[in-house]
Image (cartoon, rainbow, N blue to C red):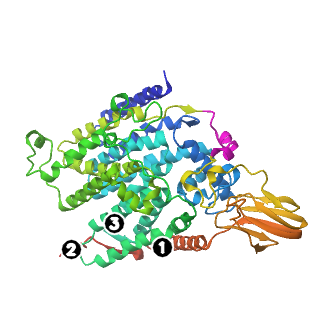
Amino acid sequence: MPEPYNMVVISAIITFGLVAALFVYRYIFPKKKLKLFFVLILLSLLPLWSILRPGSYESGDLAIHATFAMPFFDSLKEGNVVPIWNSYFLQGNGYPLYAFTYPFPYYAISLFHVAGFSFIDSIKALLIVSFIGSGVGIYAFVKKELQSDISAFTAAVFYLFAPYHLIDMHFRVALGETIAFMILPFCFFMLKNMSKTLSYKNLMGFAFAFGLLILSHQAIALITLPLLLMYAATLYPTNLQKLRYTIFVGAGFILTLALTLFYWLPLLVESKYTNILSAGTIEFPTMREFFYSPWRWGFLYQGHQGELSFILGYIHWIGIALSLLLLIKNKGHIFGILSKFFSSKSMIYREKVLYAMVLGAFITLFFMTQKVSQPIWTSITLLHGFQFSYRLLLLLAFLSSILIGILAKYIKRPTIVLVVCAITIGITILNWGNRKTVLNVTDATIRANLLQSFTKVGPGRTVWVDTDMLKPPKTPMEITQGKAEITQTYRTSTTHRYTVRVDSDTAILKENTLYFPGWTVFVDERSYPMSFTNASSPGFPMFSLLRGKYDVEVKFVDTPVRFFSKRISFGVALIMLELFLFSVFRPHSAKIVSWQKPPRSRR
């Protein structure tokens, strides 16, 4: 039996065993109510068994992320708290990869690696934590909003088993997006908490959550920002605490931006040295692709040649359509037979506001996935790095799950909701595993091929040289004119030291490291003039020395924007830590105000 279908059989057996165990539990303890949150955690384990198999597996980016994570971890060990330079890229010429890619996943991978996991297993562990955490996050948020266990459970099931979620985890291994699936609901959850009680803990929690989203996937965070602002507006209080609420929400966003300043400010300022924001186009799937997958009668989301489906979800679309009936029902009578399934209760004002906001955001983002929206994408520079409009499926899955969670609250019989959830889970079973494991791809093989892994960087190439045409350097530093003897004495990814003896009147030396702002030449511990625009070797540092012996150091130092942004971010992080500790050890002082009215005294 082929490996993928073998995994389907195993998944089916595990699912049957889980269902049987739940029925046995209910039989043995008939009076004990089975907690839906506990069931949700068990269900979230079902698509993870495939990941637990040893070795790497066929996917878009799993090995690529390991290739990125290894130099990142090496840079951390060298003492670079904020790694920027990847010395292996472009066949050893180097590239500031981590200035333009999300850093949080690689910090997390490094933490798992320190704990004893291989890099490949660290990535898989991060995928597992992110998947389970995404269900916990949206459950907590919807429970907080709707005060309904069945709504929270339903929304979490639809979010966990959204086709794009499974595609990201098993087929693409889009690590930043998978982590964003987890962090996104916590951003809204913390904003909701802050609207209830203005406290330092809630303020710090929101800033921390949204900050992690920015550091996990800047493009998704950029699209999420207006959604958070709209959501904050729906939470606006009607009492006399409007000003305090506005100040706290504004402070939350400002703290987030300050906390992540070390990442996004240098990215915006220094992206002008590459064409990362000016080159490339946005790819748009056809509208049909959001409704139907063409493989295995519509139930497989990856083709035989690795093609991907960008379907939102069959039950998701049905749920969204049915949720519209909540807005037009009249005293429980909904077009005949449908009234038998819906509760006669009307949506409260808060739920109507939430529903309208979520539905409006869903329609807007779905429009943005279509090619007709291309002028909007091209007119906003910050969106140029988005690459694929189908990335918005992450947010569409989140929004549609909330809509269906609201719908579930007004279904008369919870059993019907649970059956629909079971169907939603069951029809995705073909996508609970990857195509096959690849045992010959290990940490050792990836590290041995780091120099050959990325010989091109596509839209991120520098403006001084066509990096696609670079060749491996023969020596770390070479003599282009004159006579000299060069001895390398020390080398890390960001510090290269040499002893140079010039035997001619003058010598011109070339450092075979791709130039990017920050690379500086020091001769005998003093900054030394150099050029990187020489016609013969554009994009590489070159400098001249007179006859004599010198200690030369070529070092990647912080530019002013990196220097100040790091210190601001670290300073804000320190202040946040102090405020958090203050709120923990003196909670009565940290609590500023609550919207809850104090209870009336009894006489």
**Residue at 48% of width from left, 42% of height from top?**
172
Q: Of 483 and 57, which appears nearest the observer?
A: 483
Q: Label 1: few (<14), some or many (≥20) within 10 Å? A: some
Real-space CA distance between mark 1 and mark 2, rounded to the nearest whole angstrom: 32 Å
- Element assignment for label 3: helix
- The magenta stretch spans residue 305: no
Check disc 3 and give the amino acid type: Leu
Image-quadrant location for residue 596: bottom left
Q: Is residue 557 left or right of residue 121?
A: right
Check disc 2 and give the amino acid type: Arg
Real-space CA distance between mark 2 and mark 3, rounded to the nearest whole angstrom: 34 Å
- Element assignment for label 1: helix
**Residue at 54% of width from left, 63% of height from top?**
271
Q: Check disc 1 and report the residue beneath it.
A: 579
**Residue at 26% of width from left, 52% of height from top?**
148
Q: Is residue 256 left or right of residue 338?
A: right
Real-space CA distance between mark 3 and mark 1, rounded to the nearest whole angstrom: 24 Å
Q: Which residues are magenta?
A: 439-453
Q: Check disc 3 and report the residue beneath it.
A: 229
Image-quadrant location for residue 338: top left
- Element assignment for label 2: loop
- Sequence order check: which comes first, mark 2 or mark 3? 3
Q: Check disc 2 and report the residue beneath it.
A: 600
Image-quadrant location for residue 336: top left
Residue 539 horizontal/vertical position (percent): 67, 61
- Sequence order check: which comes first, mark 1 or mark 2? 1
- Sequence order check: which comes first, mark 3 or mark 1? 3
Q: Is residue 114 left or right of residue 184?
A: right
Q: Is residue 111 left or right of residue 444?
A: left
